[in-house]
Image (tube, rainbow, N blue to C red):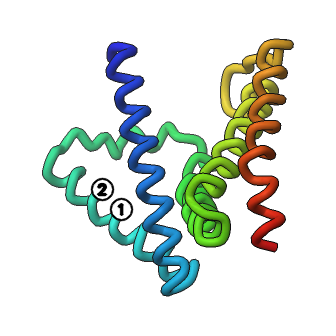
Amino acid sequence: MSMILVVLVGVIGGLAGALQGQLLGIMEDKAGTLVSTFITYAGGGLAATLLVLTVGGARLSDLKDVPWWAYTAGLAGLVVVSSIGITVSTMGLGAGLTLFTGASIVIGALIDNFGLFGDAYSLDPRRLAGIAFVIFGTWLVVGVTAVETA
């Protein structure tokens, strides 16, 4: 896959993530965390099922080679969806997604540094500086919002 296509997929994913965050915030306000999470997973599960059945290419037999702990991705997804719904509903879309993204970047860098799920990518001075900027930027966007909504 070309790098331009990879970047395009990332941008489309970012757009979908922002839209999903806003929609989750709306459902969170009206129906609460459990209902908004259920609607999100039911809709996504139905869409994924239809795609697997119609498009094909399903390689379910290859799942036998996946480590057991990789199957917890769905549970982690519940936390992702719920936390985005709660933060966006409380802080607004920009601050909620900034907090989520900042935390994801910092934790991702630590996971990479220690090679917890594969190859290790060390936290060299350049990466540490980048993480410091992420933390500072997150504080700039979220810090005031968190105090205002408390």
Residue bearing mark 1: 44
Horizontal side of 37 relative to 118 (left or right) equals left
Quickly name the residue at label 2. Answer: 48
The amino acid type found where label 2 is placed reads Ala
Residue at point 55% right, 63% down? 81
Q: Residue furthest left?
A: 54
- How far across and down, in percent of the image, does residue 141 sit? 72, 48
Seen from the viewer's position, the closer of residues 126 and 49 is: 126
Task: Describe residue 35's horizontal placement relative to residue 61 as left or right.
Answer: right
Secondary structure of the residue carrying numbered label 2 = helix
Q: Residue at x 57, y 78 (%)?
A: 33
What percent of the width, then of the height, locates residue 123? 82, 19
Residue 114 against residue 59 in the figure, above or below? above
Up-down relation of residue 57 to residue 146 (above or below): above
Q: Amino acid at mark 1?
A: Gly
Task: Give me the C-alpha separation between circle 1 and circle 2.
Answer: 6 Å
Report x, y in % for residue 139.
Answer: 80, 46
Q: Are marks 1 and 2 in contact (CB under 8 Å)?
A: yes
Residue at point 81%, 53% (across, down): 143
Q: Out of 8 and 120, give the one closest to the viewer.
A: 8
Q: Is residue 78 visible?
A: no
Task: Name the side, left or right, on which 122 lies relative to 19.
Answer: right
Count of all numbered marks drawn on residues in the image: 2
Instruction: Work out which quarter of the rendered image holds the N terminus and state it.
Output: top left
Q: Is residue 20 left or right of residue 32?
A: left
